[in-house]
């Protein structure tokens, strides 16, 4: 087998890295590297220099320290399911893949926390503690395969984050390898708050630009006593959106409040987990309430009333766990299901005030017409977190650019109503420029200054999260100005 | 919109070439990878990704590489071969995929390109030709081979060989395989040579044709015998067409699609008269159902025939479940677990039927297996061609086999051999059985009890 011949290389860095992790734990052939040119964001592809697989914190630190000493750019990668290109090696980085650090190190039921390595898969945590009555709340749709390390980097959200909060609300402590190879601990195991700056808050959602997380202490919760799920079909998107607003104004905090529009329904129904939604509706709502048994029934009744008032075509409560699971599988595989109706898609991730939902959805429909591209909507309606999925075919010349522009226009629409350009997918390389929709130059600078404290030589995951200060456009303008003088 | 900002996006360095590097006919199908949006939902389903943690050994990674060759970014080369041939063909990714991407189909098409671009040479070519061309498609030779094996087992040579420790010279996986090789018995195709149809025990309700498999009929003819017993017991006339041959799965998995087509044509001819083709080997059944894929680009005039043929093929457990069977009255007191053969569960969507049959046998207690539909590592002859990976996959499988069972039931001969190796290697005691065998044994016991009364 080829494996034996693997280390045929003259590159001294490859040899030295192999000496740290072992010959089997490094990839550097073009064919192998090609599999790492994208993550879940496939618009831009770049080959890494190599991929290394450390087994523990010490190896990670040794790798980082070597790369930093030798001025080689690098980045960390989990399962590679990120949707904004955070793990794409823009600068030919050495990818430090953390998937082999996938142990569950400790479960402390008394203090309701667990310690995991970064490569540990999100759903595996819930699966391994659910027989004891516990679970890990943040549930991104990719939870079947995404890693908790990646969740920390992106501050991942999920369907049930409406009530329970996103990843940052569930992180109690981190062990971090800094960009120069030092190992530091942030937060104390299980202690709610520590004095000083909220470094946990800064690290969580920093998209792998401040350090590499090697150990994570997460909060775990007890399963709610009862759970009820409602599925409602609407003939009119506006009615559906209005119902979302109404439910929350009624004082109900659902565990999840999801919406899908007609195009999205077409996709999930022609994919692997159809549930038989009618094809001619404009929107559906998936609403879940949970908590102590007393009161659940009342909340469900209120929800049914709201739906009726908003001209629901039909509405039903899941009869059993099986039916509920089918509805959720259908919803959670929604992005992948786009493959069934379109060769490519670009997912956007804007956040808007709930009350502007009908207005923004209308604007997205206009954008779809303007660009001649279909746009499906699957999103966390409850917290106003939109996911317009722009469908396109990259084989048609020019269509990729059109899709990018349409995506950007959707984000502009969110920013215009006082919203934000990302709720949970991160900025990555995808939305760098759109950061200007929501931040002034000064505000961006305040943030890049923080990055400089952690990542002074800018070898770790460079070129992500913020627009580059000397944008080509600006540079050209300046050159022009200089020339005209 | 700030259009100036757009110039900050650099042109990707490697996505401009449109020149495909697949130079032979029967190319990987663009429509298949067009469905893949790189979401990663397949990752955790893939046994080789579980073991290596490497993207190129994951379904979406493989799809990406196969696409990269078509886009001219990569060439059909040795390093491309590794990920493509390390796939187990277990199809677990197809179950996991939200967009139903046919990863298995793409892998097989890519293997076809690889074998045409880089034909095997030296001893690998010799071994491959001997088994795939010289042996499996020829029932007579297989029978001769079986007789040799039988001689080896019965004459005392096996005992002698085992005593001398000669086997220690073989790689461990082959030594283990020798140890668990079932005792060779008379193939049913030989046994029923002179009967065109084995009549139903009582009143004939239906007629079906039985696909006996090639290796199956030599190594596991007792399972074939049980299958015929169970079918005839339930009112089926069973035809055993003599000119049927190997299904071609091993050939197609190995990238030898021309031979696959040749065998497919022979089988379609052999079963021309049949309305229903019943098989008991999941791997073969799945292959028969996938014949249309072989004629997508080559010999397309066969495509329609292949589609009609594929419609007729059904696994014995599903057939019994759908047409009805007598519930046995005799008790087989046993505690067992069920392993989903990949090509039954992922390949044909048959999961509940065999379990229901087992539970219909009085006295059977079923202990559920965690990850029952996870590949065991047999994967055709993968355990011979990729022993290291196959062993890791087997180890992971055996961890999920409940400790306290007396039997492990399944619906595929490759799995039976592999699981028997697992039982032996990890010091377990369970017997490995085919689902229909249990039903057959229960009927036999019932018969015995009736005779005694």
Image (cartoon, coloured by chain):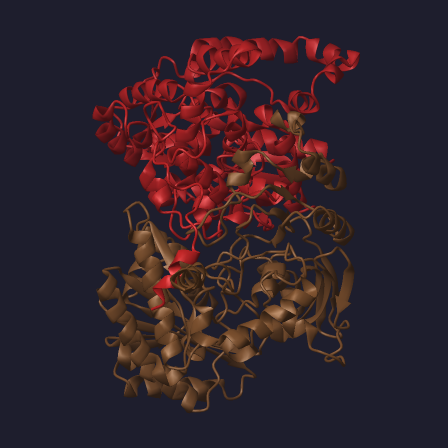
Chain colours: A brown, B red
Rendered image quadrant of residue B304: top left
Rendered image quadrant of residue B17: top left
Name the spot of residue A419 as percent of width and height, x first: 42, 79
Q: Residue at x 57, y 11 (%)?
A: B123
State the residue in front, A96 or A444. Answer: A444
Q: Is residue A334 visible?
A: no
Name the spot of residue B296 as percent of width and height, x first: 28, 30
- In the image, A409: left or right of A54? left
- In the image, B411: left or right of B323? right
Q: Of all residues shown, which one is farthest toward the front?
A: A485
State the residue in front, B81 or A477. Answer: A477
* Quarter placement of the N terminus of chain A: top right
Classify A123 as above or below A204. above
Name the spot of residue B358 as percent of width and height, x first: 51, 44
Name the spot of residue B5 as percent of width and height, x first: 40, 62
Q: Is residue B122 visible?
A: yes
Q: Residue at x 65, y 63 (%)?
A: A210
Q: Of all residues shown, which one is farthest toward the bottom?
A: A250
Q: How many marks?
A: 0
- In the image, A400: left or right of B168? left
State the residue in front, A76 or B398. Answer: A76
Q: Residue at x 58, y 63 (%)?
A: A207
* Quarter placement of the C terminus of chain A: bottom left
């Amino acid at each position: 087998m080829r494996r034996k011949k693997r280390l045929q290389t003259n590159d001294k860095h490859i040899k030295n890295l192999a000496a740290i992790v072992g010959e089997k734990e490094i990839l550097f052939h073009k064919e192998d590297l090609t599999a790492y040119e994208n993550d879940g964001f496939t618009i831009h592809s770049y080959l890494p220099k190599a991929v290394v697989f450390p087994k523990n914190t010490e190896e990670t630190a040794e790798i980082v320290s070597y790369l930093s000493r030798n001025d080689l750019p690098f980045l960390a990668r989990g399962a590679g399911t990120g949707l904004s290109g955070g793990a794409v090696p823009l600068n030919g980085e050495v990818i430090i893949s953390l998937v082999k650090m996938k142990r569950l190190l400790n479960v402390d039921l008394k203090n309701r926390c667990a310690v995991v390595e970064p490569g540990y898969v999100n759903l595996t945590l819930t699966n391994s503690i659910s027989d004891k009555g516990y679970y890990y709340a943040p549930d991104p749709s990719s939870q079947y395969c995404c890693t908790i390390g990646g969740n920390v980097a992106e501050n991942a959200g999920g369907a049930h984050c409406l009530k329970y909060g996103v990843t940052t609300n569930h992180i109690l402590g981190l062990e971090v390898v800094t960009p120069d190879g030092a190992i530091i601990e942030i937060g104390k195991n299980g202690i709610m708050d520590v004095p000083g700056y909220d470094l946990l808050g800064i690290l969580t959602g920093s998209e792998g630009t401040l350090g590499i997380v090697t150990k994570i202490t997460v909060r775990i919760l007890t399963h709610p006593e009862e759970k009820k799920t409602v599925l409602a079909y609407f003939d009119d998107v506006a009615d559906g959106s209005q119902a979302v607003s109404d439910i929350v104004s009624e004082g109900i905090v659902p565990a999840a409040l999801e919406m899908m529009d007609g195009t999205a329904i077409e996709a999930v129904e022609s994919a692997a987990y159809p549930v038989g939604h009618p094809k001619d509706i404009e929107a559906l709502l998936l609403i879940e309430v949970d908590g102590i048994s007393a009161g659940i029934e009342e909340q469900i009744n209120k929800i049914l009333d709201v739906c009726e008032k908003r001209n629901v075509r039909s509405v039903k409560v899941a009869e059993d766990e099986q039916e509920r699971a089918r509805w959720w599988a259908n919803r959670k595989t929604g992005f992948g299901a786009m493959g069934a109706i379109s060769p490519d898609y670009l997912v956007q991730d804007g956040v808007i005030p709930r009350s502007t939902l009908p207005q923004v959805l209308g604007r997205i429909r206009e954008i779809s017409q303007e660009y001649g591209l279909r746009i499906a909507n699957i999103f966390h309606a409850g917290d106003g977190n939109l996911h317009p999925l722009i469908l396109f075919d990259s084989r048609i010349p020019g269509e990729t650019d059109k899709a990018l522009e349409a995506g950007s226009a959707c984000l502009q629409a969110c920013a215009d109503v006082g919203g934000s350009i990302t709720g949970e997918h991160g900025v990555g390389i995808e939305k760098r420029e759109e950061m200007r929709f929501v931040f002034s130059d000064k505000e961006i600078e305040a943030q890049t200054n923080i990055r400089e404290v952690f990542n002074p030589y800018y070898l770790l995951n460079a070129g992500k999260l913020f627009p580059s200060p000397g944008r080509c456009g600006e540079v050209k303008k300046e050159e022009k100005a200089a020339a005209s003088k | 919109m700030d259009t100036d900002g757009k110039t900050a996006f650099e042109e990707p360095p490697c996505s401009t070439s449109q020149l495909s590097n697949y130079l032979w006919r029967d190319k990987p199908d663009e429509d298949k990878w067009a469905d893949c949006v790189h979401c990663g939902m397949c990752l955790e389903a893939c046994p080789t990704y579980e073991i290596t943690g490497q993207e190129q050994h994951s379904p979406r990674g493989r799809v990406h590489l196969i696409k990269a060759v078509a886009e001219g970014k990569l060439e059909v080369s040795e390093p491309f071969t590794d990920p493509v041939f390390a796939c187990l063909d277990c199809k677990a990714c197809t179950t996991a995929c939200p967009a139903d991407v046919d990863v298995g189909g793409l892998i097989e098409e890519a293997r076809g390109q690889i074998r045409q671009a880089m034909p095997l040479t030296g001893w690998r070519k010799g071994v491959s030709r001997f088994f795939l061309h010289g042996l499996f498609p020829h029932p007579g030779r297989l029978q001769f081979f079986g007789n040799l094996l039988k001689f080896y087992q019965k004459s005392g040579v096996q005992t002698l060989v085992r005593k001398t420790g000669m086997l220690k010279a073989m790689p461990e996986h082959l030594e283990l395989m020798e140890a668990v090789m079932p005792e060779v018995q008379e193939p049913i195709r030989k046994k029923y040579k002179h009967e065109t149809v084995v009549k139903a025990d009582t009143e004939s309700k239906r007629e079906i044709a039985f696909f006996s498999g090639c290796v199956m009929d030599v190594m596991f003819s007792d399972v074939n015998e049980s299958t015929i017993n169970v079918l005839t017991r339930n009112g089926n006339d069973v035809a055993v067409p003599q000119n049927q041959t190997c299904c071609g799965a091993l050939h197609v998995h190995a990238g030898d699609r021309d031979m696959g087509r040749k065998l497919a044509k022979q089988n379609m001819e052999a079963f021309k008269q049949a309305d229903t083709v019943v098989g008991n080997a999941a791997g073969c059944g799945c292959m028969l159902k996938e014949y249309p894929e072989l004629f997508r680009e080559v010999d397309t005039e066969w495509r329609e025939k292949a589609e009609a043929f594929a419609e007729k093929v059904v696994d014995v457990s599903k057939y019994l479940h759908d047409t009805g069977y007598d519930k046995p009255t005799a008790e087989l007191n046993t505690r067992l677990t069920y392993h989903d053969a990949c090509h039954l569960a992922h390949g044909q969507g048959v999961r509940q039927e065999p379990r229901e049959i087992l539970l219909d046998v009085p006295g059977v207690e079923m202990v559920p297996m965690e990850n029952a539909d996870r590949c065991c590592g047999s994967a055709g002859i993968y355990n011979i061609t990729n022993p290291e990976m196959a062993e890791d996959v087997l180890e992971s499988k055996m961890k999920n086999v409940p400790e306290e069972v007396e039997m492990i039931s399944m619906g595929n001969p490759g799995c039976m051999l592999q699981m028997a190796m697992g039982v032996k290697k990890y010091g377990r005691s369970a017997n490995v059985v085919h689902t229909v065998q249990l039903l057959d044994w229960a009927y036999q016991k019932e018969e015995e009890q009736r005779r005694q009364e």
